[in-house]
């Protein structure tokens, strides 16, 4: 039985570094799973669209697709945009069996990547002391999505025995700059900001620029491509693939009961 194709669905950005990161991740995934057909697509700003990718796969005879939303948050894009894409794709390509996996989410394993990015930044900046942390993420109007960031920030602080604040670049507060300033007002002069974004772009750049102006001694690079991100993608794909198999299975035939 051929495994379902994996279509990575990223948000997309006008910043070419973002798409480059997604394509690099797909390359990494292909190296890990050369038995899978894996393609990149984007919701907005850059090609290809998911429909372009799905149309190509359908023309090549692919029958089953797992769409993986390359998102950290379960907020608007995951709740609205992704289901809309799946519904439209099923209408356009009725021969395809399509299912969307869960988003990556604010998974604790990604803190390992964040720590590596932070250690590299501290080394480059010759920073030897920290007394507070800020976890910078994209914000949301969804309180539950923001609460997930706050929980992850707490876990990060516990790892390093440092106080930590969750901060948001949009739709929620505090901003990374506000969080840094608050720690400095409390007398903590060595504040580092962890950039918890999957790829470079407008929001990570804004977080870095404003946090440094506020006095942050270090701001890590976005998570980017890593073994942890790739494994998490494949984990989400595997679970969705099993769900797709269940959906595709024919319903059991009713059993005839003989009467004497």
Image (cartoon, rainbow, N blue to C red):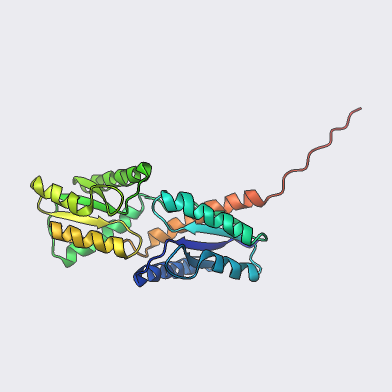
Q: Locate the N terminus and report the quarter of the image it occupies.
A: bottom right
Looking at the rendered image, the quarter that the C terminus falls into is top right
- Count numbered badges in the picture: 0
Residue 36: tell me if it is visible: no
Residue 17 falls left or right of residue 182: right
Q: Nearer the viewer, residue 65 or 141?
A: 141
Q: Vertical placement of 259 versus 77: above or below?
A: above
Identify the image quadrant of residue 254. top right
Residue that lies at the very extreme toward the top in this rendered image: 260
Instruction: Tell me which residue sits at (55%, 65%) in the image.
Output: 51
The residue shown at (72%, 45%) is 251
Against 51, residue 251 (above or below) is above
Please, which residue is most extreme toward the left here?
187
- Determine whether 260 is above or below 83 in the image: above
- For image coordinates 53% across by 58% down, the residue present is 67
Residue at figure coordinates x 48%, y 51% from the top left: 80
Q: Where is residue 204 in the image (x, y as percent from the top left)?
A: 28, 61
Question: Can residue 227 be seen?
Answer: yes
Horizontal and vertical percent position of residue 178: 18, 50
Q: Is residue 197 left or right of residue 90?
A: left
Question: Where residue 31 sits: x, y (%)?
Answer: 47, 69
Q: In which quarter of the image is residue 127?
A: bottom left
Looking at the picture, how far across and down is residue 39, in whole percent? 51, 67
Say whether residue 6 is left or right of residue 110: right
Q: Which one is nearer the viewer's eye here, 247 or 36?
A: 247
13 above or below 249? below
For residue 36, side relative to residue 72 (left or right):
right
Q: Which of 78 and 88 is in front in this view?
A: 88
């Amino acid at each position: 039985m051929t495994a379902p194709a994996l279509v990575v669905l990223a948000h997309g950005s006008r910043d070419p570094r973002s798409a480059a990161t997604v394509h690099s991740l797909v390359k990494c995934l292909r190296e890990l799973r050369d038995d899978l057909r894996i393609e990149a697509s984007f919701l907005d700003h850059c090609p290809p669209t998911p429909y372009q990718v799905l149309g190509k796969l359908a023309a090549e005879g692919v029958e089953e697709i797992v769409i993986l939303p390359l998102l950290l948050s379960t907020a608007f894009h995951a709740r609205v945009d992704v289901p809309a894409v799946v519904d439209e794709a099923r209408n356009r390509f009725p021969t395809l069996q399509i299912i969307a996996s869960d988003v990556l989410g604010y998974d604790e394993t990604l803190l390992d990547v964040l720590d590596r990015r932070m250690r590299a930044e501290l080394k480059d900046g010759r920073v030897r002391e920290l007394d507070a942390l800020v976890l910078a993420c994209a914000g949301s109007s969804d309180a539950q999505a923001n609460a997930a960031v706050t929980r992850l920030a707490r876990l990060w602080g516990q790892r390093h025995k440092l106080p930590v604040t969750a901060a948001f670049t949009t739709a929620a507060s505090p901003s990374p700059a506000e969080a840094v300033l608050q720690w400095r007002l409390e007398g903590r002069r060595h504040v580092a900001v962890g950039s918890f974004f999957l790829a470079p772009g407008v929001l990570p750049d804004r977080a870095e620029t404003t946090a440094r102006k506020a006095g942050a001694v270090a701001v890590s690079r976005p998570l980017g491509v890593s073994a942890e991100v790739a494994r998490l993608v494949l984990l989400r794909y595997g679970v969705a693939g099993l769900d797709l198999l269940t959906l595709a299975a024919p319903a059991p035939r009713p059993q005839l009961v003989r009467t004497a």
